[in-house]
Image (spheres, helix red, strand yellow):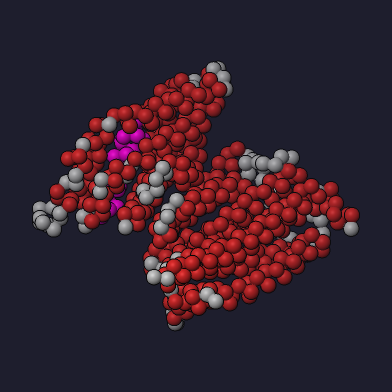
Amino acid sequence: MSELSVVPSSLARPERAPHSAPGAAAVAWMMLERDLKLAFRKASQLVQPLAFFAMVTTLFPLAITPELTRLRHIASGVLWAAALLSSLLALEFLFRDDAQDGTLEQYALSGRALTGLLAAKTAAHWLLTGLPLALMAPLAAVSLGVPAHALPGILASVTLGTVTMSLLGAVGAALTLGVRRAGALLSLLTLPLAIPVLIFGAHATQLAIRGEPYGASLTLLAALAVFGMTLAPLAAAAAVRINLE
Amino acid sequence: MMRFLDMGGYYPWVWPAYAVTLGVMGLNIYWAKRLRERARRAALRRLQTQEEP
Amino acid sequence: MTWTWFHRLASPPHLYRTAGRLTPWFAWPAALLILAGLIGGLWLAPPDYQQGDAYRIMYVHAPSAWLSLMVYTIMAVAGAIGLIWRMKAAHALAAAAAPIGASFTLATLVTGSLWGKPMWGTYWQWDPRLTSELLLFFLYLGYMGLRAAFEDLQRADRVSAVLAVVGVINVPIIHYSVVWWNSLHQGPSVMYLGRPTMPPSMLVPLLLMFLGFTLFFGAVVLVRLQGEVLNRERAARWVEEEVGA
């Protein structure tokens, strides 16, 4: 573990070999690879949000009704509320380990654009939590009585929605980096900002379940994701710098 | 006067709404003065502890 | 164009004294305007032909809603100025404004719900404006929670400034997504006087209240600003002159 969390030498000492230093995209790629490798060493952290998602979606049939025809009406709300909550779960650890062992500080001092590095970390986070959630959402949907024709729409909308969630979450995690036990605060910061995702995502899902065209809502979700991609890494980088000072 | 207080039958909502808003304003004044007063005392304390040694 | 007044404001002793001198110039006009608005709104203005006397709640509800948005914007602008020019005074202003804005957001929610009861028959409707206002309240809570989570005032200032900027960018997105969501479900929005022409006897008290509330905010924020400036000042000579004796 420890040797992996050490910064790649090309990152830590760019002044030593400036001509052979990799470009920004290559560095971002290395970061992504490193984060994925590290994450697979701690598989339990990967499984927990998924288990949580499955658990939450199980609560509703038990709490409301086992009738699939009635569950179908609330399925979009259940899926999206569960997806938002589960994507919040792993956020606290997004930057925490790297901040504690000093890796993050090395990145900030490396002379590289912190924005790109954080964008790569966010991408890794999405691959590790958002994408699995999106893949699992259709399964959960079936258990809520959603017809098969709606599953592609659910997959697409949750995929796009979790991108924005990871981006918002990165900002929240960066802001609360210096706070101990930030869990509840992190949710309080992130959830209000995630309301548009919830609204458009749940609407796309509802339309998909009814068999109506849902392209417009998907476009809005994609617009939110693009908007987040352009601004969230900047905000996260600003917050990380302040918290490291 | 009674007609004024009755507010056309809407008195159970009109008067509490005004009371809440004026209450919030009063609390704001009180909190602001308390904050300034505490900051003054804290500043004085800092000055005194600095002068002692 | 001379900027000396702006630079002078950045100096804590000057800001402290100016704030103290300006406070009565905001406080007394605010008191008079609000008093005049109360008399005009509660007594002189005629009952509305549709809503009877219930519409009089507007005279406290609408100005509170205005303050809730205005203060959040001021907070974000002050935070941005503080981040860009490293200006402690701007951060102090943001810190002073937040609790005032939050309290008026709460007042907006309570008065809106008291207005809703006679109009809708329930205390709460998921009306787009009230829903947006509720989310704005959560944004305020998050901002103040983040501020309170840091021991170090400087760090609290700068981290929360990043959050305020992120929040203010998101406020319109949240608002329009909520309006869009509401239009899907055809919620009732009959509460607000939608008529283009309001007779002067109704309009003038409303304008007096808007101006009065704004000046009231000015007076309260100046008093708080004095406190926040002192809290950010480490044992300087001017503090002794101002506070001592």
Vertical side of A165 occupied by C241: above or below: below
Q: Furthest residue to the top?
A: A67
Vertical side of C224 occupied by C11: above or below: below
Magenta segment: does it hold C184?
A: no
Vertical side of A218 occupied by A226: above or below: below
Main structural element of the magenta stretch: helix, strand or loop? helix
Identify the residue at image location x=49%, y=62%: C94
- Residue C83 sits in quarter: bottom left
Q: Furthest residue to the right?
A: B2
Q: Residue A63 versus residue B27: which sits nearer the camera?
A: B27
Q: Position of residue C124 (x, y in %)?
A: 67, 41
- Residue A87 sits in quarter: top left
Q: Quadrant of the C terminus of chain A?
A: bottom left
Q: How many marks?
A: 0
Identify the residue at image location x=42%, y=33%: A86
Whether residue C226 is visible to the viewer of this picture, yes or no, is yes
Whether residue C52 is visible to the viewer of this picture, yes or no, is no
Q: Position of residue C162 (x, y in %)?
A: 41, 56
Q: Residue A95 versus residue A163: which sits nearer the camera?
A: A95
Magenta segment: does it hold A121?
A: yes
Specify start and end residues of the magenta stretch as a single range. A113-132
